[in-house]
Amino acid sequence: MSKYKLSNLSFSFIVICLMNSTLLGILFPFMINNSKTSVFMSLVYSYFIGLLILILFLKIFKFLPDLDIFEKIDRVFSKVSSKIVSFILGLLVFSLSLIIFFRVTTFVSHEFLIDTPVIFITLILILPIVYLLMFNFDLMGRMATFNSVLGILIIVFNILALRKGMDLENLKPILNNDFVHIAKSSIVFAFSYYVPLFLTLVIPKNNITNNKNISKSLVKCYSFSFILIGFIFFTIISVLGVNVCEVYTYPSYVVLKNINVLNFIENIENISIIVFLLFMSFTVSFCLMFLKRLISFHFKLDKKKSFISTTCLIVIPIISIIFLSLPYEGFLNLIDTSYIVGLIYFLIFVICLLVLIVGKIKKVK
């Protein structure tokens, strides 16, 4: 077990950052296109599905509290099986980090730096992410605290600044979709939004100070995030309307262009959207820290070698994809990003749940 320590508050902020990383360009357009104005009903269903996910997470989190997820897998399964399960889990997290990173890259390229070669944008974005691999999860906790506080302030400011442009007629009818679409949206949203907290299983419970109150803290963060997301959807749809939202890949960015402070401060959307970019970049960094821990545990590498291995693992595929000029955005249009991310998180959920079930069976025996 690593020697670092995280406060209960820092851990809660990490959860907030991870959960909100799939919103920009992934869940926002997906939910609006599939649920339309019935999105609020989908969110209510998602909340209760998410509560079940949270309960299962806490069960796994409290199981063998001195150990992280890879140590739990090693304890529960045989040597060969543990390596296979860890490899599959690492592959899923690696795929997730690539998807989110390319979502950040394509957004910056399309909206801010249209004439800049993608290779330069990629290098600029990946350098600080790789730099973070030199440190431990205690630094991630401090970053999450900064990102979350800044993010909440910016989101509240955006909602208040857009209140004059809201038209409640855009929210009608409340139920304009069938139950199948609403249920499908609820399930995809629940797994894509709430399951990211399973990535925090790489942090042992006993590495968190005051962890007796961790359950209450996570329920509060979970409920607060749900309410905040509800307000964001309310703002987007009431300002733009569903038909306009469906046209754009990033409706959460387009709606910010309507902000006009004091009638002369414009283009504030470029500052406001930074909150989602911070959440996405943080999640990519956390995924790499996850992979770094996997490599150091199974290959018994020291900190320096583990850093080099993880850096190569993420940099080489990204650079090669860029040089090969693969139509990544076109690929995402053929296979919806939300379904891919939802499937990845569902498989992560299944693996973690399997660890708990097998571990409990062995404990009873």
Image: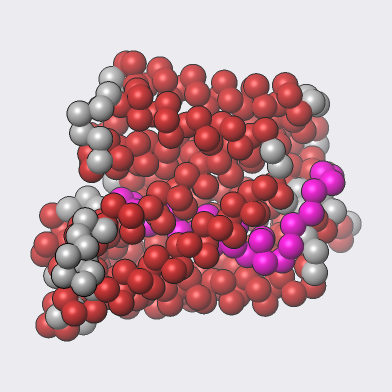
Q: Is residue 198 visible?
A: no
Residue 144 to residue 54: above or below = above
Main SS category, magenta section: helix
Quarter of the picture containing the N terminus is top right
Question: Whole-percent x and y of residue 146?
Answer: 56, 58
Say which of 201 and 302 sits in front. 302
Looking at the image, residue 67 lies above or below residue 55: above
The residue at 71%/42% (across/down) is 136
Magenta-span inclusion, residue 324: no
Residue in the image at 47% along x and 41% along y: 96
| Residue pictured at 17% horizontal, 53% vertical | 248
Q: Is residue 240 visible?
A: yes
Q: Between residues 355 and 137, which one lies in front from this camera angle? A: 137
What segment carries the magenta color? 1-27
For the residue pair 160 and 252, the one nearer the viewer reads as: 160
Q: Position of residue 147 (x, y in %)?
A: 52, 57
